[in-house]
């Protein structure tokens, strides 16, 4: 299993939100397996606090780029779409051939709502000639609400294990396996589904 250098992009405007906590966990399990990982916040590039010139240098050093983002209005946040456009137009040569995957999280119990955002990620990889490694989704991310994953008890351990398997697939040069997605599915009993949906709304 070859060691990788990962760039993890937090696609949420919230720097300590649920998407960041997923990226934080990915970084932790990556480093535990001897990989290198860095978390960058897309909002910093959108707001001009960070420059694409510095990003270019970081991209050259990484093997795999991961997008970890929330679902906004059934698609990627506008800041993420802006960032993808900038990458394609200004850094296309630098990201060509890099591995790319996405982890989406949404407030809905059903992860099917994340499918368009994952398909957008796949299309971006295809258009920029990156190596699409797959995408997974997590529902009920709003209930985590920025809580560190280790503090979630059994649920947190399950998420961390799923992300560990995700990184193992990537390190072996494989697409993300279906088992990773199966572990990330929240199974809600029908009896509590409606009250939970009302609470979330």
Image (spheres, rainbow, N blue to C red):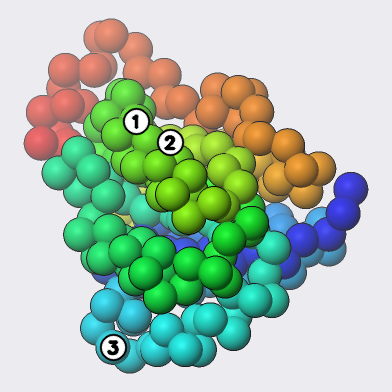
Q: Residue at x 67, y 70 (%)?
A: 62
Is residue 61 positioned above or below 72 on the image?
below
Is any atom of residue 69 visible in this view? yes
Q: Nearer the viewer, residue 128 or 117?
A: 128
Which labelled disc corresponds to residue 115?
Answer: 1
Q: Which mark is residue 137?
A: 2
Q: Where is mark 3, residue-wise? A: 48
Q: Is residue 151 left or right of residue 177?
A: left
Q: Nearer the viewer, mark 2 or mark 3?
A: 3
Instruction: Tell which circle, 2 or 1, labels the residue nearer the N-terminal end.
Output: 1
Q: Please report contact status of discs 2 and 1: CB closer than 8 Å, yes or no.
A: yes
Does any portion of residue 183 appear in the rendered image? no
Residue 16: give x, y in percent of width and height: 37, 68
Which x, y percent locates residue 12?
31, 62
How far apart, in angstroms, are the residues tagged by discs 2 and 1?
A: 8 Å
Residue 17 position (above or below residue 149): below
């Amino acid at each position: 299993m070859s060691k990788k250098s990962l760039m993890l992009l937090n696609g949420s405007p919230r720097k300590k939100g649920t998407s960041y906590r997923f990226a934080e966990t990915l970084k932790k399990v990556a480093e535990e397996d001897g990989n290198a990982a860095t978390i960058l916040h897309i909002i910093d590039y959108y707001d001009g606090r960070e420059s694409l010139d510095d990003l270019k240098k970081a991209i050259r050093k990484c093997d795999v780029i991961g997008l970890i983002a929330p679902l906004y209005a059934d698609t990627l946040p506008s800041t993420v779409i802006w960032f993808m456009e900038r990458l394609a137009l200004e850094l296309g040569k630098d990201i060509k051939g890099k591995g790319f995957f996405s982890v989406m999280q949404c407030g809905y119990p059903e992860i099917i709502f994340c499918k368009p955002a994952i398909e957008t990620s796949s299309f971006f990889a295809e258009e920029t000639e990156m190596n699409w490694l797959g995408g997974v989704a997590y529902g009920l991310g709003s209930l985590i609400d920025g809580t560190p994953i280790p503090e979630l008890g059994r649920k947190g351990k399950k998420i961390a294990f799923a992300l560990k398997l995700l990184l193992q697939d990537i390190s072996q040069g494989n697409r993300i396996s279906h088992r990773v997605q199966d572990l990330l599915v929240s199974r809600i009993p029908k009896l509590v589904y409606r009250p939970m949906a009302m609470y979330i709304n």
